[in-house]
Image: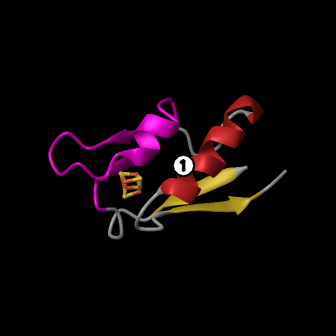
Amino acid sequence: MELRVDRERCIGAGMCVLTAPGVFDQDAEDGRVVPLDRIPAPEREAAVREAAEVCPSGAITIVSRD
Ligand code: SF4
């Protein structure tokens, strides 16, 4: 799995950080998403999929699946 985030779409809601805290963080200044791990380990994939589903702005895209 590889993920992409669109910081222009991100509205800083923070749902991704709550759902997959090791994979996403938020910028300290503007609150927008900061990807920490673009190729998450298999044990994190379920949380990443959930984060993409709950993101209110559709800013998280899963671009490949193993
Ligand atoms: S859940 Fe979506 S809108 Fe909220 S911080 Fe994460 S990427 Fe941005």
Q: Quadrant of residue 8?
A: bottom left
Residue linked to disc 1:
51
Which class describes the residues within 10 Å of circle 1: few (<14), some (14-19), or many (20+)?
A: many
Q: Provide residue 53's location: percent of width, then percent of height.
A: 57, 58
**55 magenta-colored:** no
In the image, residue 64 sits, relative to residue 9, either above or below, namely above
Q: State the residue in front, 22 or 53.
A: 53
Horizontally, is 50 left or right of 16 in the view? right
Q: State the residue in front, 57 or 39.
A: 57
Circle 1: element type = helix
Assess mark 1: CB under 8 A from ligand 1? yes
In the image, residue 36 sits, relative to residue 62, either above or below, namely above
Please indicate, yes or no, whether residue 24 appears anywhere in the rendered image. no
Q: Which residues are magenta?
A: 11-35
Horizontally, is 65 left or right of 5 in the view? right
Q: Quadrant of ligand 1?
A: bottom left
**34 magenta-colored:** yes
Q: Provide residue 18's location: percent of width, then percent of height.
A: 43, 36
Picture residue at 62% right of the left edge, 39% below the top? 47
Picture residue at 40% right of the left edge, 67% below the top? 57
